[in-house]
Image: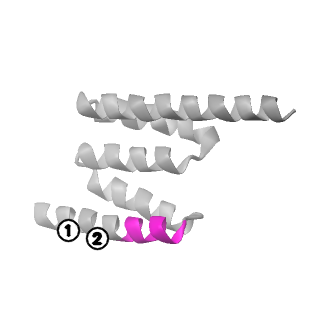
């Protein structure tokens, strides 16, 4: 029924909000490795674009810029909106600049 689908959709959004909150908490606590591991595990089945971004940010925050750039390249090969693609292209440029500055 429509009510069941509405309730199920609401549950999905609640879980998504909780997981988004988890990433923010882990990041604020500088638990970047833990955030990376948690969202890599969660994203195996979900393939969620937010989680993919969290994984990349966690790598960046750990200073693993080459790995982050590789993940951005993978994301760019996936299904993205025009805005998402534009964002990832700019993000890759920023990561590349950071990597170059370290050399």
Q: Quick check: 11 above or below 76? A: above
Question: Alpha carbon of mark 1 to alpha carbon of mark 2: how far?
Answer: 6 Å
Mark 2 surroundings within 10 Å by alpha-carbon count, few (fewer than 14), some (14 through 19), many (20 or more): few
| Quarter that holds the N terminus | top right
Q: Quick check: 27 above or below 86? A: above
At 64% from the left edge and 32% from the top edge, which residue is drawn?
Answer: 10
Q: Is residue 97 magenta?
A: no
Mark 1 surroundings within 10 Å by alpha-carbon count, few (fewer than 14), some (14 through 19), many (20 or more): few
Q: Position of residue 22 (x, y in %)?
A: 40, 28
Give the residue at mark 1.
97
Q: Is residue 26 left or right of residue 81?
A: left
Q: Where, by quadrant of the figure, is residue 62 drawn?
A: top left
In the foreground, 70 or 8: 8
Q: Where, by quadrant of the figure, is residue 92 drawn?
A: bottom left
Give the residue at mark 2.
93
At 80% from the left edge and 29% from the top edge, which residue is drawn?
Answer: 4
Extreme residue in the front direction: 3
Let me know if residue 103 appears in the view: no
Q: Quick check: 72 above or below 7? A: below
What is the magenta segment's predominant secondary structure? Answer: helix
- What span is colored magenta in the figure? 81-89
């Amino acid at each position: 029924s429509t009510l069941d689908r509405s309730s199920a959709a609401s549950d999905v959004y609640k879980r998504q909000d909780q997981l988004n909150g988890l990433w923010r908490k882990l990041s604020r606590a500088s638990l970047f490795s833990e955030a990376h591991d948690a969202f890599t595990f969660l994203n195996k089945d979900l393939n969620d674009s937010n989680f993919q971004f969290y994984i990349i940010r966690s790598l960046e925050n750990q200073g693993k810029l080459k790995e982050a750039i590789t993940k951005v390249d993978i994301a760019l090969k996936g299904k993205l909106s025009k805005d998402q693609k534009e964002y990832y292209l700019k993000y890759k440029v920023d990561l590349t600049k950071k990597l170059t500055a370290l050399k």
